[in-house]
Amino acid sequence: MARRFFKVLAALGLVVGLSGVAGGAHAEKRVALVIGNNDYKNVPKLLKAVNDARTMGDTLKQLGFSVMVAENQNRQQFSETLLAFDKAIDPGDTAFFFYAGHGFEIAGQNYLLPTDVPAATEGQEELVRDASILADRIVERLQNKKARTSILVFDACRNNPFERAGTRAVAGGGGLAPMTQLPEGVFSVFSAGPRQTALDRLSNEDANPNSVFTRTFAKELLQPGENLVQVAQRTRRLVSEMAETVKHKQVPVYFDQMVDDVFLSGLAKDAAAATRPADPPPQKVAALPPVSVPRVPKEESTNAPIASFSRHNGGWTVVFSFADPTLGISWRMAGSGDFRETGFIDTLDPRTRKRMPNPSIELPPDAQSGTIEVRYVDASGDMQGPFPIKFDPEAALIRDQRKILDMTATSWLSFREFNGLLVYYTHLVSYRCAIREVRIGIDTAVPNQVLKMPTCDMRDPGAITAGMPLYMKLAPATQFISVELTYRDGSVSEIKSFRTANRSNN
């Protein structure tokens, strides 16, 4: 059986490194399938998808994965390759699937296009569906194999491949749709946001053999001590910045249903030194499952304060938190004058039996990015610090508003009867800076239409001005509205349902 299995792989043109797939006792392992499709027969060919697959294959091998690389797969080969991938996965494994090639969204579902996908015109959506691979089905297969961790990466958000001069293209989008209903243990990354297209290159002089996304993502995967979320966030920022240099909008997104942090390239350096066992057998490195341990931040001190930021009409409030009791707190913006005392509040600290230092400061609404230096007097009377705290107004605003939205989910919508039935979304408008997109569904549990939101003004983010749309009129018979938020970082909220009958929300 094992000999026949490897003959199948060879016939499919797979480059394989499957240590431990066929053997004795099973140990949890890392298994990857990477696919790159360039040579399409009936839709435009691609230039870099095969290179992207090879680069990802090399990267994953460095991370201890047993890698299968498949190139230019037609429909039958694609199906047989997925079957071979299934056979390589055992319960508890980490499975990594990477696809570079044409992808297409139809009615909210994503399809990966084999090289023999037929040309299609308006009304031939079923032709595309039948000839392609449904992305959700790959997730389902990994779940059926009981993979402990499933990572799916799609560098497939390109223009509509079915567009041709003189014809009306099949209905759908060039970009891929968000995969919001992922099961636990699944992490997915898209090279561009919903309805966006991904760049193969930055200019005609860009000689890099890989797409803008893959060249960045592969490099970030190898950074030691970065968990999957950090890898995705850094990739998103770097790709977005590169795309902006050529006036293009490309913001990679990720969807995270992991319970714990997952590290593919080891722990943070300090944590690795503290937790590494003595003389581990080298042959076991590739078989280690993802390690779920907290990363030790750089420059972290045991007694360093942390800060929370909140935005209001008058500016910013920054609240410092200290692990140990303090007798006094002072601060300054780095490089701008002397330290200033925060003063005291009319409360006794039971630990010191003295008045408690004021833990908060105010910053103006137009405060710029920078570093806040904080120091404090400890219970022994010694000065500690200064400790640097990064202040990024945009990131702080988004984080603060998202926290509020999560805590007030039952207030996203409200209903009122006035010359009919009205639904107000004033609450969402108030915290719109944390939101990339609002989708609603009227009398359907699937949010299938976009609710247009005003743009975010960082100078006055909560302002509601005359003329802003704050409500919409509904049919009197409307029973409920479903709502789904896509946040600025690309993550997606749970779908919330708001019922109209008794004017109460679920």
Image: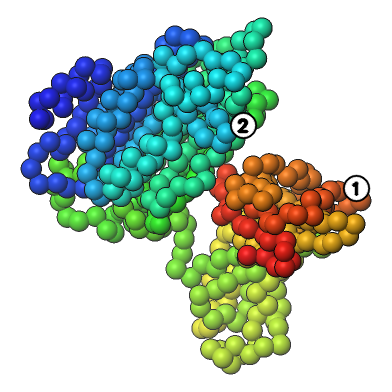
Residue closer to the observer: 174 or 279: 174
- Residue at x-position 90% and y-position 47%: 467
Question: In what quadrant of the picture does the C terminus appear?
Answer: bottom right
Q: Is residue 169 above or below residue 309?
A: above
Count residues near mark 2 (Cα–Cα under 10 Å), then give few for <14, some for 14-19, many for 20+.
some
- Residue at x-position 82% and y-position 62%: 416
Amino acid tagged 1 = Gly
The location of residue 480, given as percent across then percent down, is 68, 56
**Which callout, 1 or 2, points at the residue further toward the start of the chain?**
2
Q: Secondary structure at mark 2?
A: loop
Residue hosting label 1: 467
Res 331 visible: no
Report the side of 79 relative to 310 (left or right): left
Residue closer to the observer: 477 or 88: 477
Count residues near mark 1 (Cα–Cα under 10 Å), then give few for <14, some for 14-19, many for 20+.
few
Q: What residue occupies the far top of the structure in this picture? A: 166
Amino acid tagged 2 = Arg
Q: Quadrant of residue 116?
A: top left
The location of residue 287, given as percent across then percent down, is 21, 44
Report the side of 457 relative to 494 (left or right): right
Q: CA distance from mark 1 to mark 2?
A: 28 Å
Q: Is residue 47 above or below residue 70?
A: above
The location of residue 409, given as percent across then percent down, is 65, 62
Report the side of 306 relative to 394 (left or right): left
Residue hosting label 2: 195
- Residue at x-position 68% and y-position 54%: 481
